[in-house]
Image (cartoon, rainbow, N blue to C red):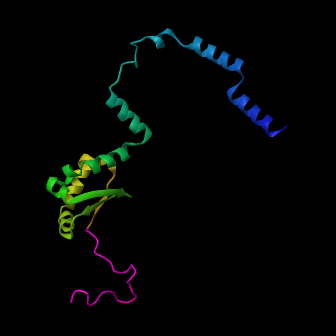
Amino acid sequence: MSESQNVYLRLKAAFGSADARAARWRARKSRSSDEESVPYGLGRDPHGLGDIMSSLSSELGWTSSLAKSDLLLAWAEIAGPETAEHSTPTGITDAVLTVQCDSTAWATQLRHMRVMIMTTIAQKFPEAGIESIRFEAPHAPSWKRGSRSIPGRGPRDTYG
């Protein structure tokens, strides 16, 4: 038997012929009772869009991702408006929230506020699964790369 015949027989066994499908449809139609088609019967009440979206997101496993994105959007509420002006959440990787700060002073200040921020996140966004926060200060300039870099100890007498 050829490969195409094998495929045809497998599909025919899985889906059946047109007559078999029609017979299954007729049997299913005759099996249904009149109670199932009552317009306002049990289980046919309309639901709000919010209820449908929350059940869909939990069914598809999106609650954690949605909570993480909500957390990033609500950073001003979590850290406070003044602090949010000088810090920006950059992402969440392996349950660690990374926050980029404008200066080392702001990074140090936010490190002191870590417990308060973690408590707020745990209360408002428990589905996000944040276990710790990393505050990053701006990076210092590097002279290790470029057309004029040389091997050695680096700039020694640059600012003298």
Q: Position of residue 52 (x, y in %)?
A: 37, 30
**In the rendered image, which quarter is residue 109 located in?**
bottom left
Q: Which residues are magenta?
A: 137-160
Is residue 146 magenta-colored?
yes
Instruction: Answer above or below: position of 8 versus 17.
Output: below
- On the question of residue 95 being in view, the answer is no
Residue 68, image x, y percentages: 33, 49
**Residue 86 as seen in the image, left or right of residue 19:** left
Residue beneath the point at 18% across and 57% down: 85
Asked whether the viewer can see residue 99, the reply is yes
Could you say which is closer to the camera, residue 37 or residue 83?
83
Quarter of the rendering occupied by the C terminus: bottom left
Taking the image as shown, residue 126 lies to the left or right of residue 105, namely right
Q: Residue 115 or 56: which is nearer the viewer?
A: 56
Horizontally, residue 33 falls left or right of residue 17, namely: left
Residue 49 pos. (x, y %) = 34, 28
Instruction: Say which residue appears at 40% left-offset and 16% top-offset.
Output: 42
Q: Quadrant of the N terminus?
A: top right
Tell whether 29 sits left or right of 10. Answer: left
Q: Indicate whether residue 22 is drawn in magenta.
A: no
Total tally of numbered discs in the picture: 0
Residue in front for this viewpoint, 85 or 128? 85
* Residue drawn 36% across the image and 18% down it: 45
Instruction: Reply above or below: 36 against 110.
Output: above
Residue 99 percent location from the top left of the image: 27, 60
Q: Residue furthest right?
A: 1
> Magenta region, mostly helix, strand or loop?
loop
Q: Residue furthest top?
A: 34
Answer with the quarter of the image where residue 26 lies: top right
